[in-house]
Amino acid sequence: MSDLDSLRIWDDPRVRSALSWYLDVAENRRPAKFRIAATIATRLDLSKSSEDALWAELDRLTPIFLGRWRVIRAGASLPPAAEGPSLLEIARELAYRMLSHCNFCPWDCRVDRVTGAKLGACKLASGSRVSSHFHHTGEELFYRGTQGSGTIFFTSCNMRCAFCQNGDISTDKDNGEETDPRTLAAIAWMLRREGCHNINWVGGEVVIHLHAIVDAIALRAGPRPTVSSSLTSYRMRPPMRAGSTRRSCGTATSSSRPRA
Protein backbone atom coordinates (compact mmCIF):
# COMPACT_ATOMS: atom_id res chain seq x y z
CA MET A 1 0.00 0.00 0.00
CA SER A 2 1.37 3.42 -0.99
CA ASP A 3 1.12 6.71 0.89
CA LEU A 4 -1.83 7.73 -1.30
CA ASP A 5 -3.71 4.49 -0.74
CA SER A 6 -3.21 4.72 3.01
CA LEU A 7 -4.90 8.11 3.45
CA ARG A 8 -7.84 7.98 5.83
CA ILE A 9 -10.02 9.78 3.28
CA TRP A 10 -10.46 6.43 1.49
CA ASP A 11 -12.18 5.04 4.59
CA ASP A 12 -15.26 6.97 3.47
CA PRO A 13 -17.09 4.51 1.16
CA ARG A 14 -18.64 7.36 -0.84
CA VAL A 15 -15.23 8.85 -1.64
CA ARG A 16 -13.69 5.48 -2.50
CA SER A 17 -16.65 4.60 -4.72
CA ALA A 18 -16.64 7.94 -6.56
CA LEU A 19 -12.86 7.96 -7.10
CA SER A 20 -12.10 4.25 -7.36
CA TRP A 21 -10.89 4.41 -10.97
CA TYR A 22 -8.68 7.41 -10.23
CA LEU A 23 -7.10 5.65 -7.25
CA ASP A 24 -6.48 2.46 -9.24
CA VAL A 25 -4.78 4.43 -12.01
CA ALA A 26 -2.71 6.49 -9.58
CA GLU A 27 -1.59 3.26 -7.88
CA ASN A 28 -0.78 1.57 -11.23
CA ARG A 29 -3.44 -1.08 -10.67
CA ARG A 30 -5.33 0.02 -13.77
CA PRO A 31 -4.20 1.77 -16.98
CA ALA A 32 -5.02 5.40 -17.62
CA LYS A 33 -7.74 5.87 -20.23
CA PHE A 34 -5.33 7.17 -22.85
CA ARG A 35 -3.54 3.82 -22.71
CA ILE A 36 -6.84 2.06 -23.39
CA ALA A 37 -7.48 4.39 -26.34
CA ALA A 38 -4.05 3.45 -27.71
CA THR A 39 -5.16 -0.20 -28.01
CA ILE A 40 -8.09 0.56 -30.35
CA ALA A 41 -6.91 0.46 -33.96
CA THR A 42 -8.20 2.40 -36.95
CA ARG A 43 -7.68 1.65 -40.64
CA LEU A 44 -7.79 5.31 -41.62
CA ASP A 45 -4.78 7.05 -43.09
CA LEU A 46 -4.99 9.97 -40.69
CA SER A 47 -2.93 12.42 -42.75
CA LYS A 48 -5.07 11.85 -45.85
CA SER A 49 -8.49 11.69 -44.20
CA SER A 50 -10.83 14.67 -44.07
CA GLU A 51 -11.79 16.19 -40.76
CA ASP A 52 -15.34 14.90 -41.19
CA ALA A 53 -13.98 11.38 -41.76
CA LEU A 54 -11.90 11.64 -38.60
CA TRP A 55 -14.95 12.71 -36.58
CA ALA A 56 -16.97 9.83 -38.04
CA GLU A 57 -14.22 7.37 -37.07
CA LEU A 58 -14.10 8.85 -33.58
CA ASP A 59 -17.85 8.30 -33.30
CA ARG A 60 -17.46 4.70 -34.48
CA LEU A 61 -14.60 3.82 -32.14
CA THR A 62 -15.76 5.61 -28.97
CA PRO A 63 -18.36 2.92 -28.03
CA ILE A 64 -15.62 0.31 -28.51
CA PHE A 65 -13.38 2.32 -26.18
CA LEU A 66 -16.12 2.58 -23.55
CA GLY A 67 -16.81 -1.13 -23.72
CA ARG A 68 -13.13 -1.97 -23.34
CA TRP A 69 -12.81 0.44 -20.42
CA ARG A 70 -15.72 -1.26 -18.63
CA VAL A 71 -14.16 -4.70 -19.14
CA ILE A 72 -10.79 -3.50 -17.84
CA ARG A 73 -12.47 -1.81 -14.92
CA ALA A 74 -14.04 -5.18 -14.09
CA GLY A 75 -10.59 -6.76 -13.94
CA ALA A 76 -9.48 -7.63 -17.48
CA SER A 77 -5.92 -6.94 -18.59
CA LEU A 78 -4.97 -4.13 -20.96
CA PRO A 79 -4.59 -5.47 -24.54
CA PRO A 80 -1.42 -4.65 -26.49
CA ALA A 81 -1.21 -1.24 -28.12
CA ALA A 82 -2.42 -1.03 -31.73
CA GLU A 83 0.34 -1.66 -34.24
CA GLY A 84 -0.79 1.22 -36.44
CA PRO A 85 -2.88 4.36 -35.84
CA SER A 86 -5.24 4.22 -32.89
CA LEU A 87 -8.13 6.10 -31.36
CA LEU A 88 -5.58 8.14 -29.43
CA GLU A 89 -3.88 9.27 -32.65
CA ILE A 90 -7.28 10.23 -34.07
CA ALA A 91 -7.81 12.52 -31.07
CA ARG A 92 -4.37 14.05 -31.62
CA GLU A 93 -4.95 14.56 -35.35
CA LEU A 94 -8.34 16.16 -34.72
CA ALA A 95 -6.88 18.55 -32.16
CA TYR A 96 -4.35 19.82 -34.70
CA ARG A 97 -6.99 20.07 -37.43
CA MET A 98 -9.18 22.14 -35.11
CA LEU A 99 -6.24 24.45 -34.40
CA SER A 100 -6.39 25.80 -37.95
CA HIS A 101 -9.94 27.08 -37.31
CA CYS A 102 -9.73 27.14 -33.55
CA ASN A 103 -12.94 26.22 -31.77
CA PHE A 104 -11.44 24.66 -28.65
CA CYS A 105 -13.51 26.89 -26.37
CA PRO A 106 -16.94 28.62 -26.40
CA TRP A 107 -15.48 31.82 -27.86
CA ASP A 108 -15.43 29.86 -31.14
CA CYS A 109 -13.00 32.38 -32.64
CA ARG A 110 -12.28 30.23 -35.73
CA VAL A 111 -8.89 31.92 -36.16
CA ASP A 112 -6.03 30.02 -37.77
CA ARG A 113 -3.63 29.55 -34.87
CA VAL A 114 -1.26 27.54 -37.07
CA THR A 115 -0.31 30.61 -39.10
CA GLY A 116 -0.88 32.99 -36.17
CA ALA A 117 -1.80 35.84 -38.52
CA LYS A 118 -4.76 36.73 -36.30
CA LEU A 119 -5.17 35.86 -32.63
CA GLY A 120 -8.33 34.96 -30.76
CA ALA A 121 -9.50 35.41 -27.18
CA CYS A 122 -6.62 33.37 -25.76
CA LYS A 123 -4.02 35.54 -27.56
CA LEU A 124 -2.09 32.44 -28.62
CA ALA A 125 -0.81 31.06 -31.90
CA SER A 126 0.08 27.37 -32.02
CA GLY A 127 2.78 27.40 -29.35
CA SER A 128 2.11 26.58 -25.71
CA ARG A 129 4.09 28.16 -22.90
CA VAL A 130 4.70 26.63 -19.47
CA SER A 131 5.24 28.91 -16.49
CA SER A 132 6.26 26.20 -14.01
CA HIS A 133 5.96 22.55 -13.08
CA PHE A 134 6.28 21.09 -9.60
CA HIS A 135 4.86 18.87 -6.84
CA HIS A 136 1.69 20.82 -5.95
CA THR A 137 0.70 20.38 -2.29
CA GLY A 138 -2.23 22.78 -2.44
CA GLU A 139 -4.70 20.52 -4.25
CA GLU A 140 -7.47 18.51 -2.62
CA LEU A 141 -6.15 15.76 -0.34
CA PHE A 142 -6.97 12.86 -2.68
CA TYR A 143 -4.96 14.59 -5.44
CA ARG A 144 -1.99 15.94 -3.47
CA GLY A 145 -1.65 12.87 -1.25
CA THR A 146 1.73 12.90 0.47
CA GLN A 147 3.95 13.51 -2.58
CA GLY A 148 1.96 16.26 -4.27
CA SER A 149 0.11 16.49 -7.57
CA GLY A 150 2.38 16.73 -10.62
CA THR A 151 1.28 20.15 -11.82
CA ILE A 152 2.17 21.74 -15.15
CA PHE A 153 1.13 25.42 -15.27
CA PHE A 154 0.36 26.82 -18.72
CA THR A 155 0.27 30.56 -19.42
CA SER A 156 -2.44 32.70 -21.02
CA CYS A 157 -6.18 32.20 -20.82
CA ASN A 158 -9.36 32.78 -22.79
CA MET A 159 -11.19 34.26 -19.79
CA ARG A 160 -10.72 37.50 -17.90
CA CYS A 161 -11.81 36.59 -14.39
CA ALA A 162 -11.16 39.41 -11.91
CA PHE A 163 -10.76 36.88 -9.10
CA CYS A 164 -8.23 34.60 -10.86
CA GLN A 165 -5.84 33.05 -8.35
CA ASN A 166 -3.27 32.54 -11.11
CA GLY A 167 -3.68 35.96 -12.70
CA ASP A 168 0.05 36.61 -12.87
CA ILE A 169 0.46 33.84 -15.44
CA SER A 170 -3.03 33.57 -16.97
CA THR A 171 -3.08 37.21 -18.07
CA ASP A 172 0.47 37.21 -19.45
CA LYS A 173 0.71 35.20 -22.66
CA ASP A 174 4.49 35.64 -22.75
CA ASN A 175 5.10 34.27 -19.26
CA GLY A 176 7.21 31.12 -19.02
CA GLU A 177 8.88 29.26 -21.86
CA GLU A 178 7.46 27.83 -25.08
CA THR A 179 7.31 24.07 -24.60
CA ASP A 180 6.71 21.48 -27.30
CA PRO A 181 4.67 18.28 -26.72
CA ARG A 182 7.76 16.07 -26.44
CA THR A 183 9.09 18.24 -23.62
CA LEU A 184 5.66 18.23 -21.96
CA ALA A 185 5.66 14.44 -22.09
CA ALA A 186 9.14 14.37 -20.54
CA ILE A 187 8.05 16.73 -17.76
CA ALA A 188 5.03 14.51 -17.02
CA TRP A 189 7.25 11.42 -16.96
CA MET A 190 9.73 13.14 -14.63
CA LEU A 191 7.05 14.30 -12.17
CA ARG A 192 5.53 10.84 -12.05
CA ARG A 193 8.92 9.20 -11.54
CA GLU A 194 9.60 11.63 -8.70
CA GLY A 195 6.56 10.29 -6.87
CA CYS A 196 3.69 12.59 -7.88
CA HIS A 197 0.37 10.76 -7.66
CA ASN A 198 -1.00 12.21 -10.89
CA ILE A 199 -0.41 14.79 -13.62
CA ASN A 200 -2.42 18.02 -13.55
CA TRP A 201 -2.55 20.22 -16.63
CA VAL A 202 -3.54 23.63 -15.23
CA GLY A 203 -3.51 27.34 -16.03
CA GLY A 204 -5.64 29.52 -16.89
CA GLU A 205 -8.12 27.61 -18.97
CA VAL A 206 -6.09 24.71 -20.32
CA VAL A 207 -8.48 23.70 -23.12
CA ILE A 208 -6.74 26.34 -25.27
CA HIS A 209 -3.67 24.08 -25.09
CA LEU A 210 -5.64 20.97 -26.08
CA HIS A 211 -3.46 20.13 -29.09
CA ALA A 212 -0.23 20.19 -27.08
CA ILE A 213 -1.69 18.21 -24.17
CA VAL A 214 -3.22 15.48 -26.34
CA ASP A 215 0.02 15.23 -28.32
CA ALA A 216 2.04 14.88 -25.11
CA ILE A 217 -0.37 12.25 -23.79
CA ALA A 218 -0.08 10.32 -27.07
CA LEU A 219 3.70 10.37 -26.74
CA ARG A 220 3.33 9.01 -23.20
CA ALA A 221 1.31 6.01 -24.43
CA GLY A 222 4.41 3.89 -25.13
CA PRO A 223 5.81 1.18 -22.82
CA ARG A 224 6.70 3.49 -19.95
CA PRO A 225 5.49 3.93 -16.33
CA THR A 226 1.81 4.79 -16.16
CA VAL A 227 0.82 8.43 -15.91
CA SER A 228 -2.56 9.39 -14.52
CA SER A 229 -3.78 12.32 -16.58
CA SER A 230 -6.51 14.78 -15.71
CA LEU A 231 -7.45 18.01 -17.42
CA THR A 232 -7.86 20.41 -14.51
CA SER A 233 -9.19 23.93 -14.85
CA TYR A 234 -12.31 26.04 -14.54
CA ARG A 235 -13.74 24.47 -17.66
CA MET A 236 -16.66 26.01 -19.48
CA ARG A 237 -17.72 23.58 -22.20
CA PRO A 238 -15.84 21.05 -24.33
CA PRO A 239 -14.50 21.81 -27.81
CA MET A 240 -16.88 21.39 -30.69
CA ARG A 241 -16.84 19.95 -34.15
CA ALA A 242 -16.75 22.55 -36.90
CA GLY A 243 -20.21 23.32 -38.20
CA SER A 244 -22.08 21.09 -35.75
CA THR A 245 -23.14 20.67 -32.17
CA ARG A 246 -20.51 20.70 -29.48
CA ARG A 247 -18.30 17.61 -29.36
CA SER A 248 -15.12 16.80 -27.47
CA CYS A 249 -12.18 15.17 -29.24
CA GLY A 250 -10.57 14.42 -25.89
CA THR A 251 -13.12 11.85 -24.72
CA ALA A 252 -10.84 8.85 -24.85
CA THR A 253 -7.50 10.43 -24.11
CA SER A 254 -7.86 11.72 -20.59
CA SER A 255 -10.69 12.54 -18.30
CA SER A 256 -11.63 15.70 -16.48
CA ARG A 257 -11.55 15.76 -12.72
CA PRO A 258 -12.73 14.07 -10.58
CA ARG A 259 -12.66 11.00 -12.86
CA ALA A 260 -9.11 10.03 -13.75
Image (cartoon, grey):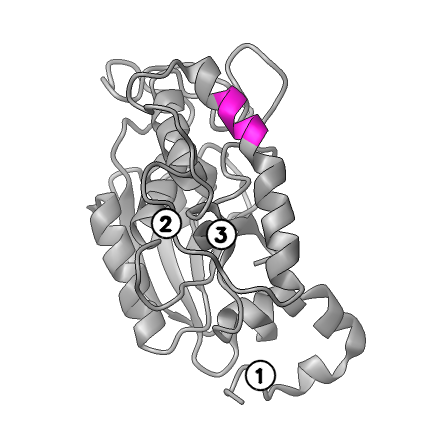
Q: Quadrant of the C terminus?
A: bottom right
Disc 3 to disc 1, how far (Cα)? 23 Å
Return the mark for residue 36: 3
Q: Quadrant of the N terminus?
A: bottom right
Q: Which residues are magenta?
A: 55-60
Q: Which mark, residue 242? A: none
Using a 10 Å C-alpha cutoff, classify the residue at mark 1 as few (fewer than 14 neighbours), some (14 to 19) or many (20 or more).
Answer: some
- Label 3: few (<14), some or many (≥20) within 10 Å? many
| Numbered mark located on residue 5 in the image | 1
The answer to whether 131 is drawn above or below residue 74 in the figure is above
The vertical placement of 143 against 252, above or below, is below
x%, y% of residue 205? 47, 41
Locate residue 233, reporting x and y percent.
Answer: 52, 48
Q: Amino acid at mark 3?
A: Ile
Q: CB of mark 3 within 8 Å of CB of mark 2?
A: no
Of the residues under marks 2 and 1, which one precedes in the sequence?
A: 1
Q: Disc 2 designates what residue? A: 217
